[in-house]
Image (tube, helix red, strand yellow):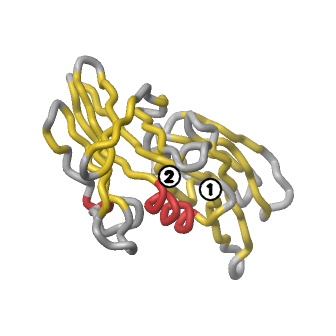
């Protein structure tokens, strides 16, 4: 938790297409104050002098303006329990669902970190490519063992190769190539997990 925030009671990490956002909740149980910070600096919600110490607070996170709700419930005595809903789902369910419907790579190119996400589109049966929260222009083509989707990252050529994993349970396998070299999958997105 950030230094100097004595009322900080909960911190969650929310992975979205643009980045992983850190949500920090401060709850002053004597003053009723409620403050939500995103990524340590951005104050997205502030309520002072709340007389009801339990309830919910809703705010938006990330470039996609994803809806998040903090639930404050009385536990035992003067203790409180805090939970985060993202897009109407518990944080754990949201993370689990994203692991099935998106694939994320982190690459460092030309001195800059990039978060590349292959994820469900609003159009059925299509996938979009996002880099740091911006939808990328891409072109797709069918190849012998699946599809290749090409896009550029600055002066670098990128390709996401999609092929069958060979089993229905594992689904499709997605591989990112940067200038022809395979980008490793993050440890939590190995090919035996969901969409990956």
The numbered mark at residue 86 is: 1
- Badge 2 marks a residue whose secondary structure is strand
Q: Is residue 6 left or right of residue 71?
A: left
Disc nearer the start of the sequence (1/2): 2
Locate residue 56, reporting x and y percent.
Answer: 76, 58
Residue located at (33% from left, 45% from top): 147
User: Pointer 2: residues within 10 angstroms few (<14), some, or many (20+)?
Assistant: many
- Badge 1 marks a residue whose secondary structure is strand
Viewer-side residue, 118 vs 49: 118
Farthest top residue in view: 155
Locate residue 17, reporting x and y percent.
Answer: 47, 42
Residue located at (49% from left, 66% from top): 96
Q: Is residue 31 left or right of residue 125?
A: right
Labels 1 & 2 near each other (Cβ < 8 A): yes
Residue located at (74% from left, 52% from top): 57
- Mark 2 — residue? 14
């Amino acid at each position: 938790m950030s230094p100097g925030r004595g009322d900080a009671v909960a911190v969650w990490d929310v992975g979205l297409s643009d980045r992983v956002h850190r949500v920090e909740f401060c709850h002053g149980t004597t003053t009723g104050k409620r403050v939500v910070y995103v990524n340590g600096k951005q104050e997205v919600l502030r309520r002072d002098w709340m007389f009801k110490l339990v309830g919910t607070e809703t705010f938006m996170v990330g470039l996609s303006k994803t809806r998040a709700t903090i639930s404050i419930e009385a536990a035992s005595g003067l203790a409180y329990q805090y939970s985060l809903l993202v897009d109407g789902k518990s944080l754990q369910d949201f993370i689990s669902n994203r692991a099935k419907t998106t694939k994320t790579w982190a690459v460092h190119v030309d001195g800059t970190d990039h978060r590349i996400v292959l994820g469900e589109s609003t159009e059925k049966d299509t996938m979009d490519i996002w880099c740091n929260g911006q939808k990328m222009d891409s072109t797709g083509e069918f190849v012998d063992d699946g599809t290749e989707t090409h896009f550029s990252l600055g002066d670098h050529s990128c390709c996401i190769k999609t092929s069958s994993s060979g089993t229905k349970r594992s689904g499709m396998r997605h591989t990112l190539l940067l200038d022809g070299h395979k980008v490793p999958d993050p440890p939590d997105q190995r090919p035996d997990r969901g969409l990956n």
